[in-house]
């Protein structure tokens, strides 16, 4: 992350096959930020686009009346949305970093409100999409499942963990660089590092041009990547559930023994209680062992040398 020539705001936009939306988004960003009372820069990160996105970005840079406010980061190939954002963080000069998608489904006007929240002392500001214009089965439903999963790991509840419009202090992004591949989930990681968090409600519009780059298999990959990077907490919770089941089963076994030998009830009467105690204890032990072994494996994985999650080909 750049430290010299610091400015107030850096807006990072990951781009993948968005040649039709880039000029519209650039114009809207300029319109919103030109009247702002703070210095700013736009950082477009081309994530290995296969269309004319890179050409359009070059044309905008050449024709810009203030080229210093506009920077382009070209990645060597397609790494994914979150690695592209992290690449943008690494070159940003702003004290506050804002992320936004290039599809114009969220109006950049909300950046001003987020900057107001940041000026009030918040460390991270998350957007909350209202009336999402997305498929329920392919986007809304998986998003809700991921919200629950992310919230259980961070211990901090947000209404929309997957909103692409977010703002955070630059020092949080700087600290994130020490977390290796966990940066793939920059928002979850940033929220864990942030002390004060706020939310801003935003209107979610229909995509104007182009098509969504996320499918159901991308969401499945996202889920397994998350489990790989944050599974320490998940395995610890599994171990706790297993320990709890074992405890309840032992208690059930003691009740069974007391009813049989002290009250003289026949084994047939207590058959179900006996079966439940045995099944619960067996299942609990399995979860406990899985949780402990999983936590052990993740600790070994965390000590391995981290691999870079992106590779910058060119910056201009």
Image (spheres, rainbow, N blue to C red):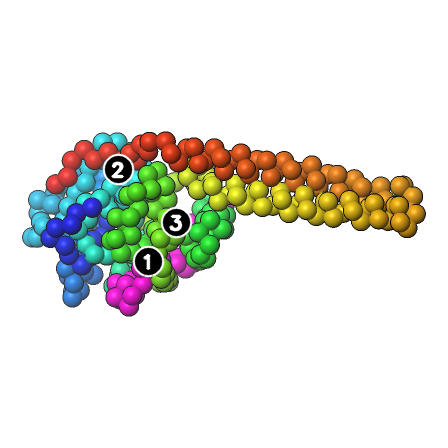
Name the residue that disc number 1 marks. Answer: 124
Instruction: Residue at 80%, 41% (x, y): give it.
Output: 274
Q: Could you tell me residue 108's position as x and y percent?
A: 26, 57
**Left or right placement of residue 81 versus residue 134 in this view:** left
Which residues fall within the magenta stretch?
Answer: 114-137
Secondary structure state at the residue bearing disc 3: helix
The number of numbered badges drawn on the structure is: 3
Q: Is residue 261 above or below residue 294?
A: below
How would you rate the neighbour count of disc 2 (Cα within 10 Å): few for under 14, some for 14-19, many for 20 or more? many
Q: Could you tell me residue 272's position as x and y percent?
A: 82, 43
The tag on residue 47 is 2
**Left or right placement of residue 257 versus residue 102 in this view:** right
Q: Which of the 4 image quarters holds residue 115? A: bottom left
* Closest to the observer, 77 or 106: 77
Q: Residue furthest front?
A: 262
The tag on residue 283 is none
Whether residue 256 is in magenta: the answer is no
Rounded to the nearest whole Å, what is the CA distance between mark 1 and mark 3? 11 Å
Q: Could you tell me residue 287's position as x and y percent?
A: 61, 38
């Amino acid at each position: 992350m750049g430290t010299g020539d610091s400015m107030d705001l850096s807006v990072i936009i990951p781009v993948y096959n968005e040649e039709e939306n880039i000029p519209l988004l650039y114009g809207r960003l300029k319109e919103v930020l030109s009247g702002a009372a703070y210095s700013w820069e736009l950082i477009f990160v081309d994530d290995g686009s296969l269309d004319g996105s890179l050409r359009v970005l070059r044309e905008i840079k050449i024709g810009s009346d203030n080229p210093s406010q506009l920077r382009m980061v070209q990645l060597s190939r397609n790494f994914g949305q979150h690695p592209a954002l992290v690449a943008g963080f690494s070159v940003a000069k702003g004290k506050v970093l804002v992320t936004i998608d290039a599809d114009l489904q969220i109006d950049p006007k909300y950046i001003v409100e987020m900057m107001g929240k940041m000026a009030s002392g918040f460390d991270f500001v998350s957007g909350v999409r209202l009336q999402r214009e997305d498929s329920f089965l392919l986007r809304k439903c998986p998003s809700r499942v991921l919200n629950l999963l992310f919230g259980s790991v961070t211990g901090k509840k947000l209404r929309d963990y997957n909103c692409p419009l977010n703002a955070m202090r630059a020092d949080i992004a700087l600290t994130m660089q020490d977390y290796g591949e966990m940066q793939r989930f920059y928002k979850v990681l940033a929220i864990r590092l942030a002390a004060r968090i706020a939310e801003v409600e935003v209107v979610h519009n229909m995509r104007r041009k182009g098509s969504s780059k996320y499918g159901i298999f991308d969401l499945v990959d996202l889920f397994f990547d998350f489990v790989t990077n944050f599974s320490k907490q998940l395995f610890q919770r599994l171990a706790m559930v297993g320990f709890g089941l074992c405890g309840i089963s032992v208690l059930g076994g003691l009740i069974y023994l007391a009813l049989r030998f002290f009250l003289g009830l026949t084994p047939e009467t207590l058959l179900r209680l006996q079966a439940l105690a045995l099944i619960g204890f067996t299942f609990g032990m399995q979860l406990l062992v899985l949780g402990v072994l999983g936590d052990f494996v993740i600790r070994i994985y965390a000590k391995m040398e981290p691999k870079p999650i992106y590779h910058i080909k060119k910056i201009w």
